[in-house]
Amino acid sequence: MNHETDQATRHETLRAEVAAWMRVHLVGEFACLRYRGGPGDEEAWPALRKAWERELAAGGWTGLGWPKEAGGRGLSVAEQVIFHEEYARAGGPGRMGHIGEGLLGPTLIACGTEDQRARFLPGILAGTQFWCQGYSEPGAGSDLANVRTRAVLDADGSWRVTGQKVWTSLAHDSDWIFVLARTDPESRGNRGLSFFLIPLTQPGIEIRPIKQLNGGAEFNEVFFDGAIAAAGDLVGAPGDGWRIAMTLLGFERGMSTLGQQMQFIRELDWVIDAARDAGLVHDPVVRQRIARAWTGLRVMRYNALRMLAGAEPKSGGANGTSSGALGREALIYKYYWSNWHRELGQLAMDVLGPNANLVSAEDEKRTRLQGMFLFSRADTIYAGTNEIQLNIMAERGLGMPREPRGTS
């Protein structure tokens, strides 16, 4: 048996294993989680979805791409793609542990200390410790280098953190938050920033839900008033925060994109079903728009595989993991998917026609598409607006002159 045949056999075996495991486990108390908990629906059964994380961990389905010495399974990119595809096909719910497993864990493997890895990685892998991300601020969203949250060093080596973070997903359901804060008060821009790990259950932290139009509050504001970050919970050196943050964002644009794409495939299927229900599947304009959406998904997939090809463990991160650094092709990803998704949301409303404006708790299909449409309107704003993404592509990818920035 040659190498290609052997690899194909292993991949098919893994695919069958994931599908079989999902059939056996996404039942009973977990059955209601099918297709739930994705973007715009993250408030769905949080306690049960945390239990689902523990179920995944017990089955060995967490830390798939982490190196074995860090407690992971060390699976290849292709094998992780297979897992995400079968997970989505079975209706696997949105992951409560995504921020910890997909972003912070790989960052600690690449940049953290042995002590930090020993204290935090096991809980993330076991589905018992949940994280949120403290990056954006009222004046530092797309322009992350404008962070104003500050941290002051105490005599005992700990840090006192004061400031505000905003749009913090699932902070109210998290145990810890990683925070980018300014430790050099004289610094400007991306200099003088540090990266802290902070427990949320302590005095000096207030979490305020941000109410959305649908009545939900999956986002939050987090206020720090002298909250403590222990000396051992600084990742890297003081002033090293920007490098750590960019490493983490590399992981965000990397493997975590696969689960997102599986959600997009699911949503496109919903739109096609709605078109059938409305008798529009033979309408030439609707068919063309559906075909364009399907083609866009394929482009998205192959670009993701192209950019992830350089993210295999051999690419040189600590302990055999990737360093989070991706090639220039990764710079287009956020701009591409956010515009594609916004167009899909508009297609969903057009397919629904007049019913798109009617709210009915009894029509689950319509409610899902309405929620997808409303949430997709924010896609080109959060995590860097379209304008910021175009600047990143021009300046970092093409080497063009930087756009003039303010000095404040």
Image (spheres, rainbow, N blue to C red):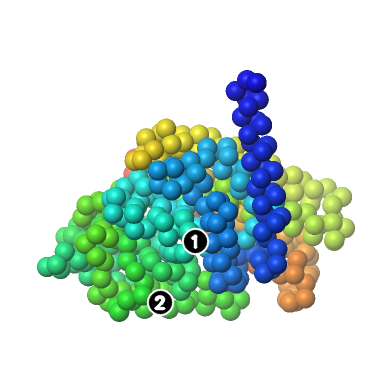
* Position in image of residue 2 (x %, y %): 63, 20
Q: Please say if 272 is above or below 49.
A: above
SS at mark 2 in the image? strand
Residue on which disc 2 sits: 207
Three-letter residue code for mark 2: Ile
State the residue at coordinates (77%, 76%): 362
Residue on which disc 1 sits: 127
- Considering only order in the chain, which callout, 2 or 1, is on the residue closer to the N terminus? 1
Q: On residue 219, which mark appears?
A: none
Q: Is residue 408 visible?
A: no
* Position in image of residue 322 (x %, y %): 41, 40
State the residue at coordinates (38%, 66%): 176
**Which quadrant of the rendered structure holds the N terminus?**
top right
Q: Nearer the viewer, mark 1 or mark 2?
A: 1
Q: Please say if 94 is above or below 110.
A: below
Out of 147 and 194, give the one closest to the viewer. 194
Three-letter residue code for mark 1: Gly
Q: Residue furthest top?
A: 2
State the residue at coordinates (48%, 69%): 170
